């Protein structure tokens, strides 16, 4: 208002404006005592440090979380651990760590077959959204144990599934899924596709340029629940299989070390970039070590329906 009288008249006619605006009271879900009881001393892994640095996040504390409004659940990282908890009606929140069950974790089906990006076979009569190598079978998969994998860091956790009771994460450049009781199952197998590491494959991981230039820090997403999913008890995850074989290796000296260097895949200006392949993995979750389920099924676009055929100019996905 341009004059004092008009402002005075406005306040008299609108007494609510003279009172203080009400604000919501913030109530911390986790008290300081929780952080003292759950303190950690181990250093973060190289992969965990890279993820936080590229997202410009602090190396300590809780820097991100996922809230599920349907189940009133909160999932978050703290240190190298994954925590999940329910928020009750009184606002109480008691998260607990998702600890791998060594006797039931690090389980993967033997004999899974797939093809790396550079060797995608063409096959007549195959559906454009499935590959010859990923047709489902009526026999259950054979499982074997690899307890050593359970010590590797678990990155980019996401709560999902039809009942919102599964947690997917990245371990050693592959997608895994775990139940709240720690029963883990491996869903992708880049080591089988690229045993020598020459193709520099990863599944569900955003490549360097995508993180730095496009601000996408993940490479997989849970499929939304549907009636069909409830009926056949199959979960779906959309992910990118990335090959950085054509990206140059750059040697960078380690800070504080004497003559030691680390190698990174870094695309220089004018050089080739990473190649991505969009895929879907369907699987039946295991909730205990006694359960035997069908192995995961991988689907992708083929032939004329492939993205590089539909959009030859595509560079990044």
Image (spheres, helix red, strand yellow):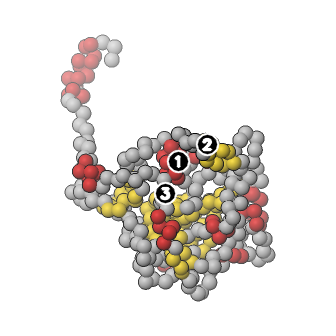
Q: Residues within 10 Å of mark 2 (few under 14, many from 20)?
A: few
Residues 100 and 231: in front is 100
Foreground: disc 1 or disc 3: 1
Q: Residues within 10 Å of mark 1 (few under 14, many from 20)?
A: few
Residue 50's label in the rendered image is 1
- How far apart in space, not on screen, are marks 2 and 3 (Cα)? 30 Å
Foreground: disc 2 or disc 3: 2
- How far apart in space, not on screen, are marks 2 and 1 (Cα)? 21 Å
- How far apart in space, not on screen, are marks 1 and 3 (Cα)? 11 Å
Check contact, mark 2 vs mark 1: CB within 8 A: no
Name the element at disc 2.
Answer: loop
Could one spot residue 214 in this view of the protein? no
Q: Which label's residue is closer to the chain start, 2 or 3?
A: 3
Is residue 179 found left or right of 279 in the rendered image?
Answer: left
Residues 7 and 294: in front is 294
Q: Residue furthest bottom?
A: 139
The image quarter in which residue 255 lies: top right
Image coordinates for residue 235, horizontal then vertical, percent = 51, 71
Name the element at disc 1.
Answer: helix
Q: Which residue is mark 3?
A: 155
Is residue 249 found left or right of 157 in the rendered image?
Answer: right
Q: Which residue is mark 2?
A: 259
Residue name at image x 71 percent, y 76 percent = 132
Residues 290 and 73: in front is 290
Is residue 162 found left or right of 192 in the rendered image?
Answer: left
């Amino acid at each position: 208002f341009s004059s004092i009288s008009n402002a005075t008249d406005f306040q008299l006619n609108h007494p609510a404006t003279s009172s203080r605006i009400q604000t919501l009271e913030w109530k911390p879900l986790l008290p300081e005592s929780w952080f003292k009881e759950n303190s950690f001393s181990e250093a973060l892994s190289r992969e965990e440090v890279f993820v936080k640095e590229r997202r410009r996040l602090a190396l300590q504390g809780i820097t991100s979380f996922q809230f599920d409004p349907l189940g009133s659940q909160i999932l978050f990282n703290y240190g190298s651990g994954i925590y999940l908890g329910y928020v009750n009606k009184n606002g109480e929140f008691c998260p607990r760590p998702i600890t791998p069950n060594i006797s039931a974790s690090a389980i993967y089906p033997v004999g899974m077959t797939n093809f790396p990006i550079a060797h995608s076979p063409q096959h007549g009569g195959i559906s454009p959204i499935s590959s010859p190598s990923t047709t489902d079978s009526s026999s259950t998969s054979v499982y074997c144990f690899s307890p050593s994998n359970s010590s590797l860091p678990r990155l980019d956790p996401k709560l999902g599934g039809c009942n919102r009771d599964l947690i997917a994460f990245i371990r050693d450049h592959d997608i895994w899924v775990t139940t709240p009781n720690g029963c883990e199952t491996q869903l992708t197998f880049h080591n089988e596709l690229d045993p020598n590491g020459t193709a520099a494959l990863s599944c569900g991981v955003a490549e360097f340029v995508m993180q730095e230039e496009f601000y996408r820090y993940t490479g997989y997403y849970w499929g939304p629940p549907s009636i069909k999913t409830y009926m056949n008890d199959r979960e779906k995850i959309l992910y990118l299989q990335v090959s950085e074989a054509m990206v140059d290796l750059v040697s960078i000296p380690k800070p504080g070390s004497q003559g030691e260097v680390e190698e990174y895949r870094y695309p220089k200006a004018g050089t080739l970039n990473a190649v991505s392949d969009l895929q879907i993995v369907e699987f039946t979750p295991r909730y205990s070590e006694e359960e035997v389920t069908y192995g995961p099924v991988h689907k992708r676009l083929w032939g004329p329906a492939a993205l590089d055929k539909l959009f030859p100019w595509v560079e990044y996905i």
